[in-house]
Image (tube, coloured by chain):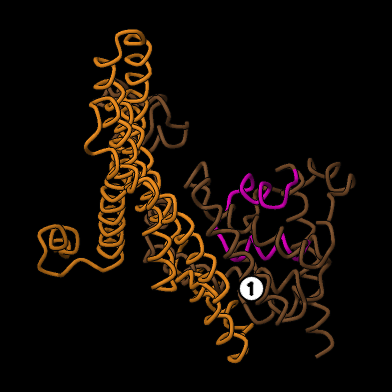
Chain colours: A brown, B orange
Amino acid sequence: MIECLPGGRGEQMWDGHLNRADRAAVYPCRGPRRTLLARDTKAVARELLARRCQRGDRAALAELIHTWERPLLYFIRRLVRDEADAWDVLQQTWLRVLHGIGSLSDPRSLAPWLYRIARNTAFSHLGASPPAHEPLEHSAEAQVDESTNGQMEFDNAEEVHRGLLRLSLPHREVLTLHFLEDLSVEEVASVLGIPPGTVKSRLHYARLALRKAIGGEASHE
Amino acid sequence: MNEVKKRFVDQLLAADPPSSEARRRYEKEVHAMLEKTLTPRQRGIYLLGAVLLLLPAGYFALLAVLTTNEATLIKFVGAYAVATALALAGVALLLFWGYWKGVVAYRTSRRWAAGVGIVYVGLLGWLFLLMAQLMPDFQNDVRVLGFLLVVYAAVAWVRHRVAQSEMAMAEKLLEIELHLAEMRELFETQGRTREASPAPPNAPGATATEAPPPA
């Protein structure tokens, strides 16, 4: 691991109008110790793509759309049942993204930002408000077993896809995000607008519900 | 994301294939969105805007021509008129370009319009500084005004250049970080492959451990 120590060349430079995220990206040696090479290629490539889009690079915007349209469409389809509506929502999402990418304060949070816009667009398209988090979920936080990653406890994608359709909306959206992306609990919380603890408990119960849905389907067959 | 998870995601996405007709319609609309193609009505507005800006530009140009043979102080009015006419004509040209092409890159157009504005303010300030010598009664006031305008334009230009450089530097650093991350992943993959594959029988370590015990 290569480590960047404070007191680098960036210290002397004027950075009057940079926000915290920009400063961290421009001067990685400033502030708390930050380990270079700590991030994987995917995370770095995403941040680079976000920055190129912010600069107004058309090729980067096309790449952004090409890379994200399938997972975003899948996520939107779990919120909006009609396919034509889902395509409309996706198009509106891109419109908002193209207008708002310049003001994205932290390019590292591209993925949660995109999902948040898609979710808000879907709910405003439906004329509904996003599901609120239930107090029951919050009280169950302590009981959640965090040791189970759950990532690969479901290995049949077809079954998972069919099972997701049978779940309630809060469970469906949290599990879809969980399956599609490597988002942290905090990032999922920022997408759904709920506390991280609630995300953990909701994920736990959603997994149980999905297992039950898949099991029920198997017993029917 | 490891390979197993990636394969799972691909399978999950494949489980919900989109209809080709809806996809074609969506792609067409997204393409138009990226190209920022103007509708006929928008093109008309662009043309109207260009014509409306060219009218005052023409008036200021005429004013500049009429003041050519006047006294020195009046000539400065002519110089202001020239600067204003050029700035207005510049913005009109941008609008006309949008009308003509039918496609507009908002970010680039805004940047050009801002550039025209900054140059115009700087030019006005410079003219005020020059004109101050001819106005003994208001010399200091005019000089301060001119100085403020020049400083404003200079600061705006420097800020713009600094922001551009910072963005370029951030991108370069990220490119370097991406290369390093790719190299690290390559080394890790090679390391895993080496650990997984058995050592060849004639390898120095292998012969020492696998040699039969002496009788």
Residue A133 drawn at (x, y percent): 83, 49
Compare residues A200 and A94 and report the one nearer the observer. A94
Q: Nearer the viewer, residue A91 or B68?
A: B68
Q: Is A189 part of what is drawn in magenta?
A: yes
Placement of B121 over or under A103, stated as above or below: above
Residue nearest the observer in this picture, B75 or A199: B75
Residue at the spot x=53%, y=48% of the render? A109
Q: How many marks?
A: 1
Q: Please indicate whether residue A94 sits to the left or right of residue B203 in the image.
A: right
The quarter of the picture where residue A36 lies is top left
Residue B5: percent from left, percent from top = 52, 67
Residue at x-position 70% and y-position 43%: A196
Say whether residue B8 is visible.
no
Q: Does residue A107 appear anywhere in the picture? A: yes
Which of these two is toward me, A101 or A162?
Answer: A101
Q: Residues within 10 Å of mark 1 (few under 14, many from 20)?
A: many
Q: Is residue B36 toward the left or the right of residue A121 in the image?
A: left
Mark 1 falls within which chain?
A
Give the residue pinned by disc 1.
A74
Give the residue drawn at x 60%, y 62%.
A151
On the image, which quarter does residue B205 sit in? bottom left
Q: Secondary structure at mark 1?
A: helix
Start and end of the magenta stretch? A171-194
Q: Position of residue B39 (x, y in %)?
A: 55, 75
- The secondary structure that dominates the magenta segment is helix
Quadrant in which the N terminus of chain A appears: top left
Q: Given the image, on which type of amino acid does mark 1 rest?
A: Tyr
Which quadrant of the rendered structure holds the C terminus of chain A? Answer: bottom right
Magenta stretch: includes residue A167 = no
Q: Is residue B197 above or below residue A201?
A: below
